[in-house]
Image (spheres, coloured by chain):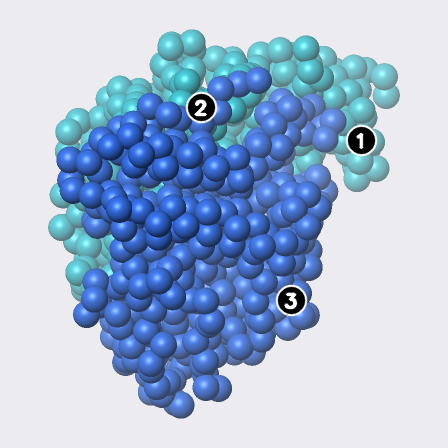
Chain colours: A cyan, B blue
Amino acid sequence: MEKRVHNFNPGPATLPLPVLKEIKENFLNFRGSGMSIVEISHRSTLFEEVINDAVDRTRRLLGLDDNYHVVFIQGSASLQFCMIPMNLALPGSPVNYINTGTWSTKAIKEAQIQGKDVKVIATSEDKNFSYIPYDYKVDNQASYLHFTSNNTIKGTQWHQFPDGQGVPLISDMSSDFMSRPFDVKPFGLIYAGAQKNIGPSGIAMVIIRDDMLKRTPDNLPTMLKYTTFIDNKSLVNTPPTFAIYVIDLVLKWLEETTGGLKEMERINKEKASLIYEVIDNSEIYQGTTEVKSRSMMNLTFRVGDEELEGRFLVEAVENGLIGLKGHRSVGGCRASLYNAVTMESVKSLVKFMREFEEKL
Amino acid sequence: MEKRVHNFNPGPATLPLPVLKEIKENFLNFRGSGMSIVEISHRSTLFEEVINDAVDRTRRLLGLDDNYHVVFIQGSASLQFCMIPMNLALPGSPVNYINTGTWSTKAIKEAQIQGKDVKVIATSEDKNFSYIPYDYKVDNQASYLHFTSNNTIKGTQWHQFPDGQGVPLISDMSSDFMSRPFDVKPFGLIYAGAQKNIGPSGIAMVIIRDDMLKRTPDNLPTMLKYTTFIDNKSLVNTPPTFAIYVIDLVLKWLEETTGGLKEMERINKEKASLIYEVIDNSEIYQGTTEVKSRSMMNLTFRVGDEELEGRFLVEAVENGLIGLKGHRSVGGCRASLYNAVTMESVKSLVKFMREFEEKL
């Protein structure tokens, strides 16, 4: 067996080991074709099976009705920040955003650059984005209400999604997509960069409700129109075939090995609670967010003073625990516990955290 | 040894076997990190080495001066069709295009959608794009002159690049990038989707001359501004790390194993000439382009009547020769002989073509 570390990277992040093994095993000869997955045509039957399977699994996992489209778009979530207002802001109607951190802020900025009538109806900026603001009022004329379901950098998560009060919800779910079941119906659009819970970097999955598509103006650039991707089933040009292949394998693992989103959520809750239990019963570890807003996916904490925290991070790496440094914009520590992070990795981190404190 | 076919796909296309083997070999443990290349952080030293190496190799292979920037952008060449006029069309100045086929036509359409003053100064549409039009006059006030260096679908190639007559050249080099040396100086921007000569699908390499950047308007969406990618060294958000890793390996193979672009061109010419020799001395194979415009990369031909052509394609596949069917929009046959297509594959195709004709 190859050496494997315990990988708590925030994204690109660890992927299920059986998936990685399958990719490796078949890398020179995909399904007996005599070609690598990276060498086959995106218009071949072989690849069509892959992309259709990925879409079908997404539909089953999320329980999507026929009025939802599933497409893959390059540019990651960041390109969606501009495509959303470009396609979905109705003329003369405000767009509503809730600001819960770095990525929400970026999404808001892109709507502002386009001169849209942006209304930020709630923000947790007053306390450095350490909580989810549940107090807000949606404009009943708004084109949509945008929020970030999980805040990778700040370590908070919406445990109950906002109520759109009749306005379609749009959510950047990059860092908790497919980590738990939820009711899709209030959503006009959901998007997620793949590199956290469902695959490698370089692609976003976008789920769009059919009625939203009527809004797309005709004169947009072809590659920035949602309708282009839907009309061509994500094959308007050559898509990132490798990334879609890996996503399909991860979704297969999620559906068949893990048993779906309900079971995944149970496991994710258990993983997170093991770490939060250490934090809550410690003299040195301190969570950085409000307890009721804290994330199951990205667990942010501090370790005593700067010096102690530095030692913690160095010793973690020495113990094969990788990716625990907080985002460069906030510092501190962060354990990202995405779907593919195993219970074994979590228990290794728990053990390390306990022993680190005990020996002080 | 695994079964391998002779892969003449137009893109995604075959990659050098030593590169594929290296990816497979290291897939579970990249450079001793205990993580797969798809699991490491794009901000890690490990990945920085990869992307910097890919950029440095590009600089050496093309002989780029310091006034050229090399960046990676998602969205493939198709997104560049809209980014180019958005960033580089000067107010009140026309943009010049030469139309040599499907991809040029798409590039022109995207400039028109944005309401730019598009002047198509030459086109070979009169003869179904079967030749390169060398007769044109550039507007001396033009923002740029755009052309497609090699026409993947129509099978033509610029063997001598157009003379910009003082206007910066912009070229879509997706299907012959890194297949031959050329003088970069007249170019304001060069772009190439990776999935033909340099890597897997899902990324474009863009090379921009520094003076072009002054043109970029401030109010563009962040992810559609060239300056964003240059200021952040392609790491504004999470880039397609796997694709960049593969590109780096392919460029290493090109530089160290093949010996650079001059040697690559010699080999590519030899490969193409072997196939054209069969076509030129045949009663059944017929080239579809003017001889002096024909491509070294995508060799298009017909085989007798529809029935015979159908048999040719079926028997080719039976003989392990894959991807010879022409683009669905034009029909016929096409052999794509990108850098990674081996002489052995070409000789197998020559043998098959000869034997197919002889036994008639």
Q: Do the residues marked 2 and 1 share a common chain?
A: yes
- Name which quarter of the figure residue B94 lies in: bottom left
- Residue at the spot of label 3: B64
Mark 2 — on which chain does it sit?
A
- Element marked by disc 3: loop
Is the residue marked by circle 2 packed among few (<14), some (14-19), or many (20+) residues within 10 Å? many
**Alpha carbons under labels 1 and 3: distance apart:** 40 Å
Asked if badges 2 and 3 are on one and the same chain, I answer no
In which chain is the residue bearing label 3?
B
On the image, the x and y values in percent for residue A225 come to: 26, 53
Q: Which residue is mark 1?
A: A314
Q: Nearer the viewer, residue B176 or B36?
A: B176
Of the image marks 2 and 1, the number of the one nearer the N terminus: 2
Specify the amino acid type for callout 2: Gly
Left or right, residue B12 beside residue A346: left
Residue B161 drawn above or below residue B313: below
Question: Residue placed farthest to the right in the image?
Answer: A360
- Disc 3 crowd rating (10 Å Cα; few below 14, some 14-19, many 20+) is some
Question: What residue is pinned by disc 2?
Answer: A34
Q: Rounded to the nearest whole Å, what is the CA distance between mark 2 and mark 3? A: 37 Å
To which quarter of the image does residue A14 belong? top right
